[in-house]
């Protein structure tokens, strides 16, 4: 179905929904080819498209739900047997996309609690972060995927101790269900010097 086939009201509603798509491939060369096809298929913005350890290629993109789904479908078809993992998250939490656009930042001051979830794949970290953020009133401090991490990914949350515990439990449960959770921790009242390195 093409977006132009929908009535105008429905088209406007769908266009406002934040959505992300991810394709992870076992071939760098095929990944570059897939990135081109994803961009040509629909109006999506690439958040990153890069080789990652160990010799894979990850493509993450955003746009309207129908565009992301269409591009993800086309990319998966072209990837064929080189496709390792994929996801589409419609209505992704509002903190996820801005964090994926940047490399992380510095915070300072005393925090009530921080929580960290580490996963073995890019897709599992993004899904777990989305679940955690939707579970409790927490803020995403950092979200790092694949590069420099041996293909693993992690994210860091902060908030009240009870909210961080709830969010980490939910996110870790999501990643654990698929067997992709590496580790999760909750740190109450982290040392102020530690927060400079988060």
Image (cartoon, rainbow, N blue to C red):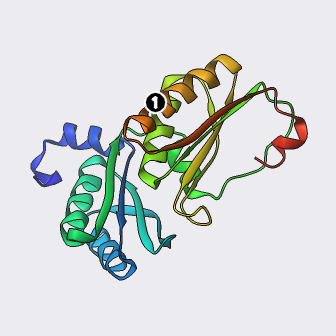
Residue 93 appears in view: no
Label 1 SS: helix
User: In front here: 164 or 21?
Assistant: 164
Residue with the most extreme bottom position: 29
Q: Position of residue 112 (x, y in %)?
A: 78, 24
Foreground of the two, 55 or 89 = 55
Report the front residue among 35 and 145: 145
Q: Is residue 66 above or below residue 173?
A: below
Look at mark 1 in the image and give the residue it sits on.
173
Please determine whether, in this image, residue 40 is positioned above or below residue 149. Answer: below
Q: Can you give x and y, in whole percent of width and height, for residue 113 in the image? A: 74, 27
Tell me what residue is drawn at x 42 percent, y 34 percent: 174
How far across and down, in percent of the image, does residue 6 sit?
A: 13, 45
Instruction: Residue at 81% x, 26% y: name it.
Output: 189
**Residue 115, quarter of picture:** top right
Question: Residue at horizontal 49%, vertical 46%?
Answer: 125
Task: Using a 10 Å C-alpha cutoff, classify the residue at mark 1 as few (fewer than 14 neighbours), some (14 to 19) or many (20 or more).
Answer: some
């Amino acid at each position: 179905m093409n977006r132009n086939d929908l009535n105008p009201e429905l088209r406007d509603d769908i266009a406002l929904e934040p959505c992300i798509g991810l394709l992870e491939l076992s071939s760098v060369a095929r990944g570059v080819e897939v990135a081109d096809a994803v961009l040509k298929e629909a109006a999506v913005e690439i958040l990153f498209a890069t080789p990652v350890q160990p010799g894979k290629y990850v493509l993450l993109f955003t746009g309207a739900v129908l565009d992301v789904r269409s591009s993800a479908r086309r990319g998966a078809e072209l990837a064929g047997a080189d496709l390792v993992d994929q996801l589409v998250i419609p209505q992704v939490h509002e903190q996820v996309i801005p964090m994926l656009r940047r490399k992380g930042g510095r915070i300072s001051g005393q925090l009530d609690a921080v929580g960290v979830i580490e996963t073995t794949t890019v897709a599992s970290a993004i899904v777990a972060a989305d679940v955690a953020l939707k579970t409790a009133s927490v803020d995403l401090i950092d979200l790092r995927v694949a590069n420099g991490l041996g293909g693993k990914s992690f994210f860091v949350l902060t908030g009240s101790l009870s909210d961080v515990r709830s969010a980490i439990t939910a996110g870790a449960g999501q990643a654990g269900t698929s067997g992709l959770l590496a580790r999760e921790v909750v740190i109450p009242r982290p040392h102020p010097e530690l927060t400079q390195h988060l």
